[in-house]
Image: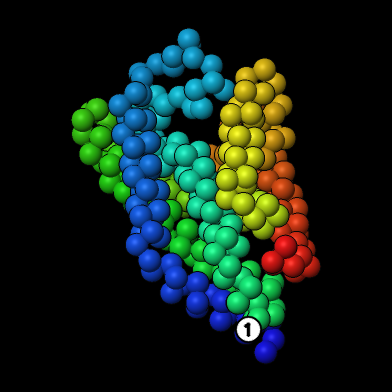
């Protein structure tokens, strides 16, 4: 059996596992976060910028004029990518460490020695589910934006144009790439550390509190630290770093994580 067959078999097996209620619950949370972010974006939008809030400290400010623009219906979805990235990181990390904790890998690799084929198929299935979840979240966000636009009296005439469709597609792809980066790092931490508590403690503590604390005093952190870089990719670029720079650095981190995870999985004893 070649590597392609191993990937295909692992993909089919993982898709069966993803039918569990826990997967639907995670997808539901992604949708809920997107809806919540949209409600907050519209509820807190101002007619003019709030000069008392720094751009870096507030994440992003939304003005009523922006909501009426072609990007308006998906601005809430973009704003929720930070929290979605955190959720995806946790889900992929826990999913990987559970494979070690429950002892399933020992049995699995006796029947399927092509470990990298298994990993490729597994990630392929999980990325497919993630793509579907983000698409549903985007649609829920747009539906919520339509309701909130009526509440705030926002003109939606520019929402039904080709420019608006391109904005929605770009925002979806950016969110997908950003969350895939988070997922790869979470998977690699799970493979390297094999402990759910340790992997989550290190990953969450570094990529969220520590990075954001440093960011408050050093704007350059946004283009260097992985969590901030992945977030910038999901947002399509931020004040302190362009989308192109964030994408290049984020891709580098993702490739390093993928190589480290693959090498560790292929060479380390799963019982160690």
**Residue 8 on image: x %, y %:** 57, 80
**Residue 213 on image: x %, y %:** 62, 23
Label 1 Cα crowd, 10 Å radius (few <14 / some 14-19 / many 20+): few
In the picture provided, is 149 more to the left or to the right than 218? left
* Residue at 38% in and 42% down: 33
Q: Relative to residue 66, is residue 217 depicted above or below? A: above
Which image quarter holds the N terminus?
bottom right
**Residue 119 on image: x %, y %:** 63, 69
Which residue is situated farthest in the bottom direction here?
A: 1
**Within the image, what quadrant is residue 242 found in?**
top right
**Within the image, what quadrant is residue 244 found in?**
top right
Which residue is situated farthest in the top direction here?
A: 52
**Residue 220 in sight here:** yes
In the picture provided, is 249 more to the left or to the right than 18? right
Disc 1 element? helix
**Residue 227 in sight here:** no
Which image quarter holds the C terminus?
bottom right
Q: Relative to residue 227, is residue 134 depicted above or below? A: below
Q: Relative to residue 202, is residue 5 depicted above or below? A: below
* Residue at 60% in and 40% down: 201
**Residue 93 on image: x %, y %:** 57, 53
* Residue at 75% in and 53% down: 256
Closer to us: 82 or 238: 82
| Color style of the picture | rainbow
* Residue at 35% in and 24% down: 45
- Residue topped by disc 1: 111
């Amino acid at each position: 059996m070649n590597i392609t067959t191993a990937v295909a078999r692992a993909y089919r097996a993982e898709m069966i596992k993803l039918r569990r209620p826990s997967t639907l619950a995670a997808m539901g949370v992604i949708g809920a976060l997107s809806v919540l972010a949209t409600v907050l974006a519209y509820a807190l939008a101002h007619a003019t910028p709030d000069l008392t809030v720094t751009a870096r400290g507030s994440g992003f400010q939304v003005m009523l004029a922006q909501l009426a623009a072609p990007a308006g219906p998906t601005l809430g979805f973009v704003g929720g990518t930070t929290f979605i990235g955190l959720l995806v990181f946790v889900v992929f990390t826990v999913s990987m460490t559970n494979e070690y904790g429950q002892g399933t890998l020992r049995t699995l690799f006796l029947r399927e020695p092509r470990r990298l084929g298994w990993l490729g198929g597994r990630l392929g299935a999980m990325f497919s589910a993630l793509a579907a979840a983000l698409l549903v979240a985007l649609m829920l966000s747009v539906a919520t934006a339509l309701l909130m636009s009526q509440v705030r009296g926002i003109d939606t005439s520019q929402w039904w144009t080709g420019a608006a469709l391109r904005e929605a597609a770009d925002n979806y792809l950016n969110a997908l790439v950003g969350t895939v980066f988070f997922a790869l790092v979470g998977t690699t931490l799970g493979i390297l550390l094999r402990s759910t508590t340790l992997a989550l403690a290190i990953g969450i503590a570094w990529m969220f509190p520590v990075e954001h604390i440093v960011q408050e005093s050093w704007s350059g952190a946004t283009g260097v630290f992985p969590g901030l870089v992945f977030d910038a990719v999901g947002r399509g670029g931020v004040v302190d770093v362009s989308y192109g720079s964030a994408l290049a650095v984020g891709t580098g981190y993702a490739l390093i994580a993928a190589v480290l995870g693959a090498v560790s999985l292929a060479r380390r004893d799963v019982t160690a």
